[in-house]
Image: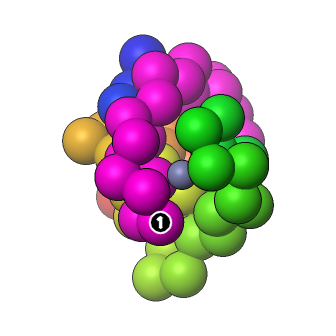
């Protein structure tokens, strides 16, 4: 479980991290904006306190 923080409204969303895929965007349940990853492959890397599993595969 990761805590995703919406960059628009700063709302925090609890979301399960998928085992083997990136999540390139998510919809904020508070402001309904579609939040896309910018720096990374995955919104978890950009906006949460966790990293996505895929980013560690090639380490
Ligand atoms: Zn939001």
Q: Give the number of marks.
A: 1
Can the viewer see residue 31 in this picture? yes
Q: Residue at x 54, y 24 (%)?
A: 15
Query: Within the magenta stretch, is there residue 52?
Result: no
Residue situated in front as seen by the camera: 20 or 48: 48
Please give left or right for residue 15 compared with residue 56 in the image.
right
- Please provide percent x and percent y for residue 50: 31, 39
- Please provide percent x and percent y for residue 34: 74, 61
What span is in magenta?
4-25
Main secondary structure found in the magenta portion:
loop
* Residue at the left extreme, as displayed: 49
Q: Residue at x 40, y 42 (%)?
A: 11
Residue beneath label 1, please?
8
- Please provide percent x and percent y for residue 45: 41, 57
Task: Pick the quarter of the image with the C terminus.
Answer: bottom left
Task: Pick the quarter of the image with the N terminus.
Answer: top left
Q: Is residue 16 above or below residue 46?
A: above
Residue situated in front as seen by the camera: 30 or 53: 30
| SS for dot 1 | loop
Q: Is residue 1 above or below residue 47?
A: above
Please give left or right for residue 20 compared with residue 1 in the image.
right
Mark 1 beta carbon near ligand 1 (under 8 Å): yes
Residue situated in front as seen by the camera: 35 or 53: 35
Callout 1 crowding tier (Cα within 10 Å): few <14, some 14–19, many ≥20: few
Judging from the image, the colouring scheme is rainbow
When asked about the image quadrant of residue 35, the answer is bottom right
């Amino acid at each position: 479980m990761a805590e995703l923080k919406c960059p628009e409204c700063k709302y925090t969303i609890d979301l399960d991290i998928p085992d083997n895929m990136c999540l390139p965007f998510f919809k904020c349940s508070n402001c309904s904006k579609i939040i896309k990853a910018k720096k990374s492959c995955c919104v978890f890397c950009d906006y949460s306190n966790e990293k996505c599993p895929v980013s560690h595969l090639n380490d």
